[in-house]
Amino acid sequence: MAQKLPKRSQVKQEYTWNLDTLFTNDESCRRVIKEILEESKSFAEDHQGKLHKYSAEDLVKAIRKFEALLARFYRTGSYTNLRTSTNMEDQEALRLSGEFSQTAAIAGANLQFFQDEIAALDAKKLDQAAELAPEYKTFLADIAAFQKHRLDPKVENALAILSPSLELPSSVYRISKAADMRFPDFDYEGKAYPMSYVLYESHYCEVEDTGLRRAAFAAFSKHLKNYHNINATIYNAQVQKEKTYATMRGFDSVFDYLLFRQKVSRDQYDRHLDLTMERLAPIMQRWARLLQKKYKLDDMRYSDLKVVLMPDYNPAISVEEAVSHIDEAMQVMGEEYRDMVMRFKEERWVDFARNEGKSTGGFCTVPPKAQPYILLNWNDSLSELYTLAHELGHAAQGLLCEKHNSSLEADFTWYDVEAPSTFHEMLLSYSLIKKAEAEGDDKKKARVLAAMIENTYYHNFVTHFLEAYYQREVYRLVDRTTTTASIPTPTVPAWSSPQRCIRG
């Protein structure tokens, strides 16, 4: 039976991440927040209105200063985000996050001029700077490519200052889900069962007992319905904001705006969605029929899709066992890669604990010049082992991008961000299958093959695919029906966001 989640103060430290590589405490973070504000002012005083007079060498020096300042900016934002992610009931963490948001808005406004002025420079000077510092070639090219979509500097500055307010849709959603939603216990066959977002996603959706599973889904959905109006309003505010941003910046559609920074064409985007629906959807339909047969279900429901195919062969996996499985899976990549990934245990990259107020699901963020941070809600299942492998794929990608690129070019397109994480899941499957074959255990091998569908396939071609397919329909409606006059102001440009998170 599922247990109520403990308070954050009750979880073991060994199952939490180590934030000391960012800041040892909140006060040291506050000091840097203040320093960032002052440094951004000084940077503006030193360089604003002067870039057109700079030589290519002077421009490169200014970019290096900008990069160092932005790295501190990202690290500080990561710390405040990570603090709140593990316990959104922590008022001190929320207060610190608010302080950062306000400072970040002013600092972002102070720094807004820099890319605007670079965009206005002669192409020859930009080429000379890129030749002197090849690590900034893409950074400079991206600025030049975005030039036609830039607004008047005063407008850009105003948007930067307003960024905390403009980010409210995502902030309100995160906090309300983790801190304010309190699910009542639900009854099944005369027994009371605890319920929460984490308990449903990490336990009830997979339980073998069909009656309990469906009762949990009904109770979970019933309580979520109490929030459907506010959640719909939040979501509408976000997509309308993006549409306004697209219109103000001269994009033909919200799709063109959202795909621009990903360097992906609309044709590619539509082709991938349509091919997935045509070629891969039938696989899930076959899988659903297999589950229905296995569990002898008269009808197949959405609440049945996450149940495991082989519940009688689904042993619990401890964190310590998971570390061993990851170690074995990484061997094929060579010693250097394996050693890089396996630092996750000793350096405490991962927050395994399940506690009240913690963010649901999983994500990975890799702040500049710091270790990766991975959030999980560990439930001793094979599914969660796949999630760990998945997030470590994001961590490895982030570390290698930081190692081989400047911080200004270390980000990667969201369009293919799931490739390294999916690859890690395949490495795990390969390792587990080889081990089962060596043991002559056909049942264990079958369990791994089933897990590949339940996790790797389901994650990419059901969860994310349905999200993307639904999102496309929403944005089509927004493009057809929205007028600029009815839309709120858009958000701050993406470069100034301090949260470089990759959600599973």
Image (cartoon, grey):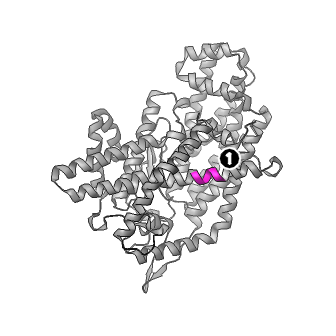
Image height of 504 relative to 65, above or below:
below
Judged from this view, the residue extending furthest toward the right is: 485
Identify which residue is drawn at 45% across, 67% down: 199
Q: Position of residue 34 (x, y in %)?
A: 63, 41
Please tell me which residue lies in front, 352 or 391: 391
Q: Is residue 216 visible?
A: yes
> Which segment did they paint magenta?
469-473
Q: Position of residue 327 (x, y in %)?
A: 28, 45
Image height of 6 relative to 500, above or below:
below
Q: Is residue 170 left or right of residue 361?
A: right
Question: In terms of secondary structure, what is the magenta stretch mainly?
Answer: helix
Image height of 214 relative to 82, above or below:
below
* Tag 1: amino acid: Gln
Number of disc labels: 1
Q: Quadrant of residue 454?
A: bottom left
Identify which residue is drawn at 71% across, 16% down: 122
Q: Quadrant of residue 181?
A: bottom right
Please tell me which residue lies in front, 330 or 82: 330
> Badge 1 local density, few (<14 within 10 Å), some, or many (20+)?
some
Q: Position of residue 289 (x, y in %)?
A: 40, 64
The verdict on residue 253 being magenta is no
Please tell me which residue lies in front, 378 or 35: 378
According to the image, label 1 marks what residue? Answer: 102
Q: Is residue 45 left or right of residue 390?
A: right
Q: Position of residue 117 (x, y in %)?
A: 72, 24
Q: Is residue 162 visible?
A: no
Identify which residue is drawn at 53% across, 43% down: 272
